[in-house]
Image: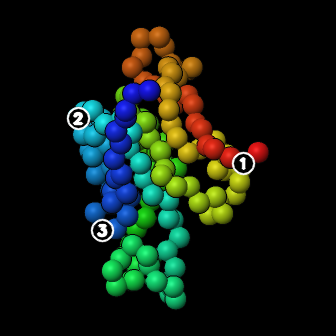
């Protein structure tokens, strides 16, 4: 099995620097330099008050402000599928209770691409063909 490399670009979907242009530019740059995958966080709900300590900060305070924009990652993946050619796109975590189950089934990793069935053969437009999500049986 070959070693693959990916990067996390969650900073492009959260906070004052979040923008479609930043998402597209950084993802295309990751693809251009040879990364195999790009991953994003899934935290579309940020509580205003948290009593527990945030485990990833020395002071225990969460770095997330509830009033900052935080793009919905499944929509981001769909947007980026139209901006890239071969890189895998996914969430490094998908918090199912944020959504209705039928919205989440099959929507974690965009992995294959095929020509869009309604486009002509000489079209350069591609559409995502396979979405996969691990689920317990």
Q: Which mark is residue 89?
A: none
74 relative to 132, above or below: below
Residue 132 visible, this orientation: yes
State which quadrant residue 118 falls in: top right
Q: Is residue 6 left or right of residue 118?
A: left
Q: Which mark is residue 136?
A: 1
Which residue is labeled 3 in the image?
16
**How has the structure been colored for display?**
rainbow
7 or 69: nearer the eye?
7
Residue at 35% over, 77% down: 57
Q: Pointer 3: residues within 10 angstroms few (<14), some, or many (20+)?
A: few
Q: Total of numbered circles in the picture?
A: 3
Kindly report which numbered mark, 1 or 2, lies closer to the viewer in this rendering.
Answer: 1
Q: Which mark is residue 33?
A: 2
State which tag comes first along the sequence, 3 or 1: 3
Sequence-wise, which precedes: disc 3 or disc 2? 3
**Which residue is found at the position 52% from the left and 41% from the top?**
109
Quadrant location of the C terminus? top right
Left/right placement of residue 11 relative to residue 92 reads left
Circle 1 packing at 10 Å, graded few (<14), some (14-19), many (20+), is: few
> In this picture, is 50 found above or below 2?
below
Q: Earlier in the sequence, mark 1 or mark 2?
A: 2
Name the mark nearer the viewer: 3 or 1.
1
- Residue 15 percent coordinates (x, y): 34, 68
The residue drawn where x is 44% and y is 41% is 89
* SS at circle 3: loop
Q: Say left or right for 96 vs 17.
A: right
The x and y percentages for residue 84 are: 36, 33
Label 1 – label 2 distance at C-alpha = 35 Å
């Amino acid at each position: 099995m070959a070693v693959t490399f990916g990067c996390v670009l969650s900073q492009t979907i959260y906070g004052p620097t979040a923008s479609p242009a930043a998402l597209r530019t950084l993802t295309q740059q990751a693809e251009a330099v040879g990364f195999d995958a790009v991953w994003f966080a899934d935290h579309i709900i940020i509580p205003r008050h948290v009593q527990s300590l945030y485990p990833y900060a020395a002071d225990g305070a969460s770095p997330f402000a509830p009033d900052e924009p935080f793009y919905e990652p499944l929509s981001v993946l769909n947007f980026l599928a139209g901006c890239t050619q071969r890189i895998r796109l996914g969430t490094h975590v998908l918090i199912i209770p944020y959504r209705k189950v039928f919205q989440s089934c099959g929507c974690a990793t965009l992995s294959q691409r095929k020509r869009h069935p309604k486009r002509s053969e000489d079209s350069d437009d591609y559409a995502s063909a396979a979405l996969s999500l691990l689920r317990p049986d």
